[in-house]
Amino acid sequence: MSILEILLLAVALSMDAFAVAVASGCASRTRSLRHYARVGGAFGLFQCLMPLAGWLLGGAVHGYIEAWDHWIAFGLLAWVGGNMAAQGVRGLRQGAEGDACPRVDPTAGRNLWILAVATSIDAFAVGLSLALTSTGIVLPALIIGVVCAAISAGGVHLGSTLSRLRVVNRFSELLGGLALLGIGVNILRQSL
């Protein structure tokens, strides 16, 4: 694979992570460099590790993962997105002020790791595919991880910028949860 092909692959693999990062930035109370680094680092790390794991497993589990990867990603995104949307609806019912921040950071604790795994399952499948074509994995995995980290941090920044708009801020937790659910549904739609 050429560097250009690897970069294009990295950007394509990062689109789910970008969308989740935007939703996370919209719904998060934290707007700091640390938050951007935490989300970008976790998403980038898993986008780097998953192709390595897929490549190492090679063809042994390719058929099984290919048949279920979209369902796993959908389940993880639906769980986090559903909880986030429900929390947003509860906040709206309780009469949350238009400029109030959401109470739940979707990237705090285990949710961050769940989202990082959910958005990197496709990278695992790419690693499996590269193993089947006898393509090296170290350079592609590193590039995929770095590109995803940068794109995800940018997504958090964009989301936090959008959340400052009064109408977006009031509905940000609900919108973020619905966005995660939409990403999960889109993953299913693309694979069925």
Image (cartoon, helix red, strand yellow):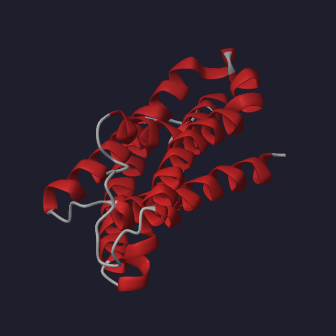
For this orientation, the residue located farthest to the front is 94
For the point 15% across and 61% down, which residue is it? 33
Q: Is residue 4 visible?
A: no
Q: Looking at the image, which is closer to me, 151 or 135?
A: 151
Q: So how many labels did they put on this image?
A: 0
Task: Give the left or right position of residue 108, taking residue 60 as reference.
Answer: left
Vertical position of residue 74 compared to residue 157: above or below: above
For this orientation, the residue located farthest to the right is 192
Vertical position of residue 72 compared to residue 162: above or below: above
Q: Position of residue 21 (x, y in %)?
A: 40, 59
Quarter where residue 18 is shown? bottom left
Q: Position of residue 120 (x, y in %)?
A: 50, 41
For this orientation, the residue located farthest to the top is 60
Q: Is residue 85 visible?
A: yes
Q: Position of residue 128 (x, y in %)?
A: 61, 30
Task: Give the left or right position of residue 3, taking residue 126 as reference.
Answer: left
For this orientation, the residue located farthest to the left is 33
For the point 38% across and 67% down, which residue is it? 26
For the point 47% across and 56% down, which residue is it? 90
Q: Looking at the image, which is closer to me, 39 or 121?
A: 39
Task: Give the left or right position of residue 130, taking residue 170 as reference.
Answer: right
Q: Position of residue 174 (x, y in %)?
A: 50, 62
Q: Looking at the image, which is closer to me, 2 or 51?
A: 51
For the point 77% across and 30% down, which residue is it? 67
